[in-house]
């Protein structure tokens, strides 16, 4: 199709990683002034608001039916891939729970390139990134939750997350 550029997943990943590096550099500068925990708390609040807004948008598109974990997971996978270049793989799946591993993450790579310590990277992910994802799934179905089971800084180099019905 003439005039339409096709963007590869690698291009999306690089763009998300660059944006994340700018965000974390900014947050680090703010943290130097107001304290890093306070800066992270603000970041978490912003991510929760973004997740809720994104989830509401998807909820409107999905219609009125109740969405279980198995129905929400593909939405999250497509969003993560198309907006951030994140790739995932399902480890196990049922209507009430989907476990998956994050193969490639621009946010982890950005934090790593900025020289963050592994424990700080994990803390930031658990606070800010999980806040976005949990708020998004709760907007889709308040009985769902999203959390990290293990972080790539431990073990085999992948993050393992779970989407579950409470």
Image (cartoon, rainbow, N blue to C red):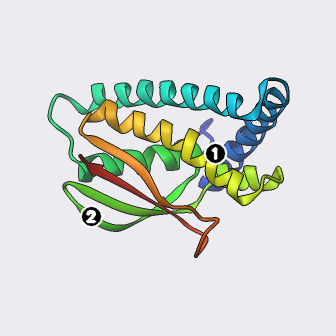
Residue visible at 29% across and 34% down?
Answer: 140
Q: Which residue is mark 1?
A: 124
The image shows residue 144, relative to residue 85, as above or below, that is above
Crowding around mark 1 (Cα neighbors within 10 Å: few <14, some 14 to 19, many 20+) is many
Crowding around mark 2 (Cα neighbors within 10 Å: few <14, some 14 to 19, many 20+) is some
Answer with the quarter of the image where residue 64 lies. Answer: top left
Q: How far from the left and from the top, in percent, is residue 12?
A: 63, 47
Task: Nearest to the eye among marks 2 and 1: give it.
Answer: 1
- Outermost residue to the bottom: 156
Residue visible at 42% across and 27% down?
Answer: 52
In depth, the one of 165 and 66 nearer the eye is: 165
Q: How far from the left and from the top, in percent, is residue 129?
A: 55, 42
- N-terminal label among 2 and 1: 2
Residue 82 left/right relative to 165: right
- Outermost residue to the left: 65
Answer with the quarter of the image where residue 29 lies. Answer: top right
Q: How far from the left and from the top, in percent, is residue 112?
A: 76, 56
The image shows residue 107, relative to residue 153, as above or below, that is above
In depth, the one of 10 and 133 nearer the eye is: 133
Give me the disc on residue 93: 2
Q: CA distance from mark 2 to mark 1?
A: 27 Å
Residue visible at 29% across and 29% down?
Answer: 59
Residue visible at 84% across and 24% down?
Answer: 33
SS for dot 2: strand
SS for dot 1: helix
Is residue 31 shown to the viewer in this render?
Answer: yes
Q: How far from the left and from the top, in percent, is residue 115?
A: 83, 54
Residue 61 left/right relative to 26: left
């Amino acid at each position: 199709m003439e005039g339409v550029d096709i963007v590869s997943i690698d291009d999306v990943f690089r763009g998300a990683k660059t944006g994340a590096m700018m965000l974390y550099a900014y947050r680090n500068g703010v943290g130097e002034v107001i304290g890093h925990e306070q800066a992270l708390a603000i970041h978490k609040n912003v991510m929760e608001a973004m997740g809720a807004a994104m989830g509401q948008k998807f909820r409107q598109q999905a219609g009125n039916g109740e969405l279980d974990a198995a129905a929400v997971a593909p939405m999250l996978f497509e969003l993560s891939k198309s907006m951030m270049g994140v790739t995932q793989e399902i480890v196990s799946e049922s209507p009430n729970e989907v476990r998956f591993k994050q193969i490639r993450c621009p946010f982890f790579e950005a934090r790593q390139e900025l020289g963050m310590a592994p424990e700080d990277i994990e803390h930031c992910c658990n606070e800010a990134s999980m806040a976005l994802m949990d708020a998004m799934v709760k907007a889709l179905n308040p009985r769902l939750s999203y959390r990290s089971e293990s972080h790539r800084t431990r073990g085999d180099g992948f993050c393992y997350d779970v989407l579950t019905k409470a």
